[in-house]
Image (spheres, rainbow, N blue to C red):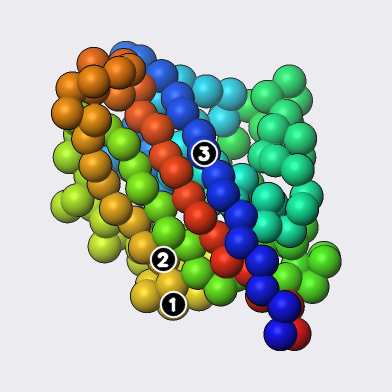
Amino acid sequence: MKVRVGFGFDVHKLVSNRPLWLGGILLDYEFGLDGHSDADVLIHSICDALLGAANMRDIGYHFPDTSEEFRGADSKELLRRTLALIAGKGYRVGNVDVTVCAEQPKINPYIPQMQRCLSEVMGVSEDDISIKATTTEHLGFTGREEGIASYAVALIEKD
Protein backbone atom coordinates (compact mmCIF):
# COMPACT_ATOMS: atom_id res chain seq x y z
CA MET A 1 0.00 0.00 0.00
CA LYS A 2 1.23 3.47 -0.86
CA VAL A 3 0.46 6.34 1.52
CA ARG A 4 1.02 10.05 1.04
CA VAL A 5 0.54 13.06 3.31
CA GLY A 6 -0.56 16.57 2.37
CA PHE A 7 -0.92 19.87 4.20
CA GLY A 8 -3.61 22.50 3.63
CA PHE A 9 -4.23 26.03 4.86
CA ASP A 10 -6.99 28.54 4.27
CA VAL A 11 -8.11 31.85 5.69
CA HIS A 12 -11.10 34.10 5.09
CA LYS A 13 -12.14 37.46 6.47
CA LEU A 14 -15.17 37.73 8.77
CA VAL A 15 -17.83 40.11 7.42
CA SER A 16 -21.43 41.02 8.19
CA ASN A 17 -24.37 39.93 6.07
CA ARG A 18 -22.91 36.51 5.24
CA PRO A 19 -23.77 33.12 6.70
CA LEU A 20 -20.99 31.30 8.55
CA TRP A 21 -20.37 27.87 7.03
CA LEU A 22 -17.73 25.81 8.78
CA GLY A 23 -17.09 22.10 8.40
CA GLY A 24 -20.10 21.84 6.12
CA ILE A 25 -22.59 23.12 8.67
CA LEU A 26 -24.22 26.51 9.21
CA LEU A 27 -23.23 28.13 12.49
CA ASP A 28 -25.43 30.63 14.29
CA TYR A 29 -23.12 33.66 14.40
CA GLU A 30 -23.43 37.35 13.63
CA PHE A 31 -20.66 37.28 11.00
CA GLY A 32 -19.81 35.03 8.09
CA LEU A 33 -16.73 34.43 5.98
CA ASP A 34 -16.11 36.46 2.85
CA GLY A 35 -15.25 34.53 -0.28
CA HIS A 36 -16.17 33.59 -3.82
CA SER A 37 -17.78 30.34 -2.67
CA ASP A 38 -19.41 29.81 0.73
CA ALA A 39 -15.88 30.41 2.15
CA ASP A 40 -15.84 27.32 4.40
CA VAL A 41 -12.19 27.55 5.49
CA LEU A 42 -12.27 24.17 7.20
CA ILE A 43 -13.34 22.32 4.07
CA HIS A 44 -11.01 24.40 1.89
CA SER A 45 -8.02 23.43 4.03
CA ILE A 46 -9.02 19.74 3.73
CA CYS A 47 -9.29 20.08 -0.07
CA ASP A 48 -5.81 21.62 -0.22
CA ALA A 49 -4.37 18.88 2.00
CA LEU A 50 -5.91 16.13 -0.16
CA LEU A 51 -4.81 17.75 -3.41
CA GLY A 52 -1.32 18.34 -2.03
CA ALA A 53 -1.01 14.72 -0.92
CA ALA A 54 -1.90 13.59 -4.45
CA ASN A 55 0.47 16.18 -5.99
CA MET A 56 -2.45 17.85 -7.77
CA ARG A 57 -1.76 21.54 -6.98
CA ASP A 58 -4.34 23.43 -4.90
CA ILE A 59 -8.00 24.32 -4.54
CA GLY A 60 -7.59 27.61 -6.41
CA TYR A 61 -6.16 25.80 -9.41
CA HIS A 62 -9.12 23.41 -9.69
CA PHE A 63 -11.88 25.76 -8.49
CA PRO A 64 -10.70 29.31 -9.33
CA ASP A 65 -12.33 32.33 -7.74
CA THR A 66 -12.46 33.88 -11.21
CA SER A 67 -14.96 31.27 -12.38
CA GLU A 68 -18.67 32.03 -12.23
CA GLU A 69 -19.27 28.28 -11.91
CA PHE A 70 -17.95 28.44 -8.35
CA ARG A 71 -19.57 31.73 -7.22
CA GLY A 72 -21.48 30.91 -4.04
CA ALA A 73 -20.51 27.23 -4.35
CA ASP A 74 -21.23 24.85 -1.50
CA SER A 75 -17.80 23.75 -0.29
CA LYS A 76 -19.13 20.25 0.36
CA GLU A 77 -19.48 19.96 -3.43
CA LEU A 78 -15.91 21.21 -3.88
CA LEU A 79 -14.80 18.50 -1.45
CA ARG A 80 -16.76 15.85 -3.40
CA ARG A 81 -15.03 17.00 -6.59
CA THR A 82 -11.66 16.93 -4.83
CA LEU A 83 -12.31 13.35 -3.73
CA ALA A 84 -13.14 12.44 -7.35
CA LEU A 85 -9.90 14.08 -8.51
CA ILE A 86 -7.72 12.10 -6.13
CA ALA A 87 -9.71 8.92 -6.87
CA GLY A 88 -8.79 9.48 -10.53
CA LYS A 89 -5.19 8.84 -9.46
CA GLY A 90 -6.21 5.78 -7.45
CA TYR A 91 -6.20 7.42 -3.99
CA ARG A 92 -8.72 7.31 -1.17
CA VAL A 93 -8.80 9.18 2.14
CA GLY A 94 -7.06 7.55 5.09
CA ASN A 95 -7.71 10.29 7.63
CA VAL A 96 -7.69 14.06 8.07
CA ASP A 97 -6.64 16.21 11.02
CA VAL A 98 -7.83 19.82 11.10
CA THR A 99 -7.16 22.76 13.42
CA VAL A 100 -9.44 25.81 13.20
CA CYS A 101 -8.10 29.09 14.57
CA ALA A 102 -10.78 31.52 15.81
CA GLU A 103 -11.53 33.55 18.90
CA GLN A 104 -15.25 33.52 18.11
CA PRO A 105 -17.49 31.74 17.64
CA LYS A 106 -16.54 28.89 19.92
CA ILE A 107 -16.15 25.87 17.62
CA ASN A 108 -15.98 22.97 20.09
CA PRO A 109 -19.75 22.51 20.51
CA TYR A 110 -20.12 22.05 16.74
CA ILE A 111 -17.31 19.53 16.20
CA PRO A 112 -19.42 16.32 16.44
CA GLN A 113 -21.90 17.72 13.90
CA MET A 114 -19.04 18.73 11.57
CA GLN A 115 -17.53 15.25 11.85
CA ARG A 116 -20.87 13.64 10.96
CA CYS A 117 -21.34 15.93 7.98
CA LEU A 118 -17.80 15.45 6.65
CA SER A 119 -17.97 11.70 7.26
CA GLU A 120 -21.01 11.50 4.98
CA VAL A 121 -19.42 13.67 2.29
CA MET A 122 -16.06 11.89 2.38
CA GLY A 123 -17.34 8.35 2.82
CA VAL A 124 -15.09 7.66 5.81
CA SER A 125 -15.71 7.01 9.49
CA GLU A 126 -16.19 9.95 11.84
CA ASP A 127 -13.19 8.52 13.66
CA ASP A 128 -11.08 9.31 10.57
CA ILE A 129 -11.90 13.04 10.84
CA SER A 130 -10.18 14.92 13.64
CA ILE A 131 -11.24 18.54 14.17
CA LYS A 132 -9.70 20.73 16.83
CA ALA A 133 -10.28 24.37 17.72
CA THR A 134 -7.86 26.89 19.14
CA THR A 135 -7.46 30.62 19.59
CA THR A 136 -4.43 32.82 19.09
CA GLU A 137 -4.84 34.40 22.54
CA HIS A 138 -6.08 37.64 20.91
CA LEU A 139 -2.95 37.95 18.73
CA GLY A 140 -3.00 38.57 14.97
CA PHE A 141 -6.00 38.83 12.64
CA THR A 142 -7.75 35.82 14.16
CA GLY A 143 -7.15 37.21 17.64
CA ARG A 144 -8.69 40.52 16.61
CA GLU A 145 -11.67 38.51 15.26
CA GLU A 146 -11.06 39.76 11.71
CA GLY A 147 -11.01 36.28 10.19
CA ILE A 148 -10.79 32.55 10.68
CA ALA A 149 -7.91 30.28 9.64
CA SER A 150 -7.81 26.52 9.20
CA TYR A 151 -4.92 24.07 8.92
CA ALA A 152 -5.31 20.49 7.73
CA VAL A 153 -3.21 17.40 7.25
CA ALA A 154 -4.52 14.51 5.16
CA LEU A 155 -3.28 10.98 4.66
CA ILE A 156 -4.31 9.31 1.42
CA GLU A 157 -3.85 5.66 0.45
CA LYS A 158 -3.50 3.64 -2.73
CA ASP A 159 -3.41 -0.17 -2.96
Q: CA distance from mark 1 to mark 2?
A: 7 Å
Left or right of residue 99: residue 67: right
Q: Amino acid at mark 1?
A: Ser
Q: Amino acid at mark 2?
A: Ile
Kindly identify the residue that appears in the image at 67 percent across and 57 percent down: 53
- The earlier-in-sequence mark between 3 and 1 is 3
Kindly identify the residue that appears in the image at 57 percent across and 30 percent down: 37
Left or right of residue 27: residue 152: right
Kindly identify the residue that appears in the image at 34 percent across and 56 percent down: 131
Which residue occupies the foreground of this view, 16 or 143? 143
Mark 3 crowdedness (10 Å alpha carbons): few <14, some 14-19, many ≥20: many
- Compared to residue 39, the image places residue 66 above or below, namely above
In the picture, the quarter occupied by the C terminus is bottom right
Is residue 33 at all visible to an observer of this figure?
yes
Residue 138 % position (x, y): 18, 22
Residue 39's mark?
Answer: none
- The earlier-in-sequence mark between 3 and 2 is 3
Left or right of residue 107: residue 43: right
- Compared to residue 154, the image places residue 128 above or below, namely below
What residue sits right under mark 2 in the picture? 129
Q: CA distance from mark 3 to mark 2?
A: 16 Å
What residue sits right under mark 3 in the picture? 9
Residue 158 % position (x, y): 73, 78
- Compared to residue 16, the image places residue 23 above or below, namely below
Is residue 68 at all visible to an observer of this figure?
no
What residue sits right under mark 1 in the picture? 125
